[in-house]
Amino acid sequence: MNTHFFYSLFLSLLIVSFGCQPDHLTDEPIAEASQADSSRLRYLKEVEWPRAYREHDTVLLDRILAKEFQLIDANGTWSDKEFEIQWIKKNATQYDSFHYEIKKLEILENGTAIVAGSGHIYRDTLYTVYQSSNVLVKREEQWKAVLSHVSGVKAGGKP
């Protein structure tokens, strides 16, 4: 595990959270070139990532997750890319439908993106919602997830 990477990521998130931006970051709208990135990130999070889990597509999940990917689940348990790939190989989809609602998508000039929102899971007559945040980095023109956090799981309600 690259401690320096996570320390740098933590500092970047603090800077963004508190609005104390270094000189090279601005409050300007996403540049036109980033509109393609925004569309790509939306497609990745709303379509491809759920498809990888639904269809047990380890090749797709491998493409989405960076080698250093870490997940913190709603119980506070940490897992990594290899665990996630093995998990989808062994576990059947437990829902009738799923959709992810993006509530925040921010692309920083340093090639980092934050995608946060709500996952909506429908199974029989039960509805579950959770919140998640994801940090992605752009490498060789590909967005890779490096960190995901899930919280606020509310199960058994109605939409």
Image (cartoon, rainbow, N blue to C red):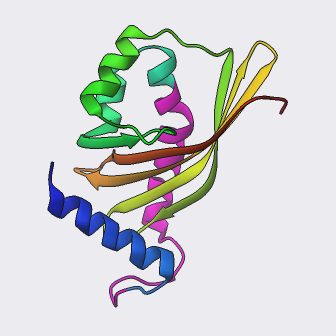
Q: Is residue 141 left or right of residue 39?
A: left
Q: Quadrant of the C terminus?
A: top right
User: Is 38 or 55 nearer to us in this picture?
Assistant: 55
Residue drawn at 32 percent across, 63 percent down:
111
Q: Residue furthest bottom?
A: 23
Q: Residue furthest right?
A: 158
User: Is 20 or 138 nearer to us in this picture?
Assistant: 20
In percent of width and height, residue 26 lies at 44, 84
In percent of width and height, residue 17 lies at 49, 74
- Marks counted in the figure total 0
Q: Is residue 140 left or right of residue 115?
A: left
Residue drawn at 34 percent across, 90 percent down:
23
Q: Is residue 107 visible?
A: yes
In percent of width and height, residue 119 lies at 63, 37
Residue drawn at 14 percent across, 54 percent down:
2
In percent of width and height, residue 126 lies at 78, 20
In the rendered structure, which segment of residues is drawn in magenta? 22-50
Q: Is residue 109 visible?
A: no
Residue 50 lies, with reference to residue 143, above or below; the image says above
Q: Is residue 74 left or right of residue 120?
A: left
Residue 141 lies, with reference to residue 105, above or below; the image says above
User: Is 33 or 123 nearer to us in this picture?
Assistant: 123
Q: Is residue 13 left or right of residue 80?
A: right
Residue 125 lies, with reference to residue 108, above or below; the image says above
Residue drawn at 29 percent across, 29 percent down:
62
The overriding secondary structure of the stretch rendered in magenta is helix
Question: Quick check: is 67 in the magenta stretch?
Answer: no
Specify the quadrant of the image occupied by residue 93. Answer: top right
